[in-house]
Image (cartoon, rainbow, N blue to C red):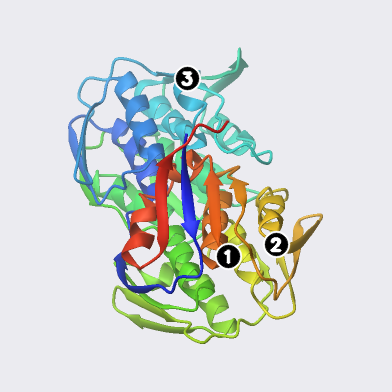
Amino acid sequence: MDKFIINGGKKLSGTVKVSGAKNSSLAIMPATLLNNGKNVLTNTPEVNDIFTMIKLLKHLGVKAEFNNHTLELDTTDIISQEAPYDHVKKMRASVYVLGPLLAKYGYAKVSLPGGCAWGPRPINLHLEAMKKLGAEIELEGGYIIAKAKKLKGANIHFDISSVGATGNVLMAAVLAEGSTTISNAAIEPEIVQLADFLKDMGAQIEGIGTSTLKIEGVNELHPANVRTISDRIEAGTLLIAGALTRSKITLDYIDHEHINSVLWKLEDSGAKICKDNNLVTINAEGLSIKNVDVTTAIYPGFPTDMQAQWTAFMCLAEGVSSVTDNIYLDRFKHVPELNRLGADIEVRNNTAVVQGGRKLLGAKVMSTDLRASASLVLAGLAAKGETEVLRIYHIDRGYQRIEEKLQALGADIKRVPGTEF
């Protein structure tokens, strides 16, 4: 397994381009199953989750070519409606094939999903909604088996706003017979882009960007092309890298509206933020970091995917801060590893209480999930001495060669082969 070796304490400077959003690509890719033909997805990030989804789509019969961030998916000859465990176990987003396969072919057999090893994230919202659309659902041998001669439009209300369930049901409903209304739908930018892509394919959808989506089913959809939006979580991570190293850096190709909740908190910490079209600059030179409490919330609130990174940042702040995760209550496996670097953090229920003003010292730490990995890299940038971050295959799932972006900004970080387990 590869690892990162970081020599901390380096100032960062310069401009770096934000990659395409992996969570948007992971929704758009299975949406192509709804049509027959070649779809072109540009600005697709080269991260492991994308390669996992490509392997799954190829298993279903999709022809895929991926070069220089351009992904071509030809869905003309689908040969299977089964998503096996070997593919799905690696990534929860694989369940996104359920809705398209069920809507287009009337059958889907999808392994119960895997992914990050923290917290219960049930897919009951997906399954109950599919039942309302007329599907017969069985759970057998670790698989979801869904059948329907023809899905029928329905009124679907989510008690909890769910990105995954909204996307899956949206993809199923566009080919269902009649009208479907999804209330308390997720409004994340990735869902907005998915809905726009479906419309480009010929779907009839109203209310895009709101919590109520109205879909009028159509008989067929056609291929379409799309440029993936920028990754707001990568952007937030890089901005915190600038803040905790007390540097001035600029991000290129980012819609600042997508990360306003993070930008506002960074301003509360004392950093200066400048927004100019698709550029966002953070100036934290000479910053005396103020303690800022954060509570995660569904979009447009502070993202749960930024919770670990913010916790690392608050280790350097003055005073005590609290970081509460109301989305995933036990997503704090990064805390013991941050404490190994000299942080003073205590987890109380779903809140990390951070005693700020600590001097971080380099140490060997281990990644446990995607965003936890990012928090350890950030802490390593600020720590004195050498930090080794092990098991970085987690971070490769969602960040496109993050070490190269940090190197371009002046960080002393390198990837080296490792043999740890």
Between residue 15 and residue 60, name the one nearer to us. 15
> Taking 17 as reference, is 357 above or below it?
below
Across the whole image, how many numbered discs are drawn on residues?
A: 3
**What SS does tag 3 mark?**
helix
Name the residue beneath numbered marker 2: 342
Seen at 43% across and 74% down, the residue is 11
Q: Nearer the viewer, mark 2 or mark 3?
A: 2
Q: Based on the displayed image, in which of its 4 quarters is residue 97 positioned?
A: top left
The residue lying toward the viewer, choosing from 388 and 151, is 388
- Find out whether the residues at labels 3 and 1 contact each other: C-beta distance under 8 Å: no
> Which element is circle 2 on?
loop
Q: Give the residue displayed 53% in from the left and 32% down from the top.
A: 130
> Quick check: 79 left or right of 360?
left
Residue 170 in view (yes/no): no
Kind of residue indicated by mark 1: Ala
Specify the label residue 383 is tagged with.
1
Residue 360 place in picture, x, y as percent: 64, 66
Residue 186 appears at what percent x and percent y?
52, 54
Residue 61 vs residue 91, the one in the foreground: 91
The residue carrying mark 3 is: 86
Nearest the camera: 254 or 395?
395
Measure how far apart labels 1 and 2 are at the Cα level: 9 Å
Q: Amino acid at mark 2?
A: Gly
| Disc ID at residue 37 | none
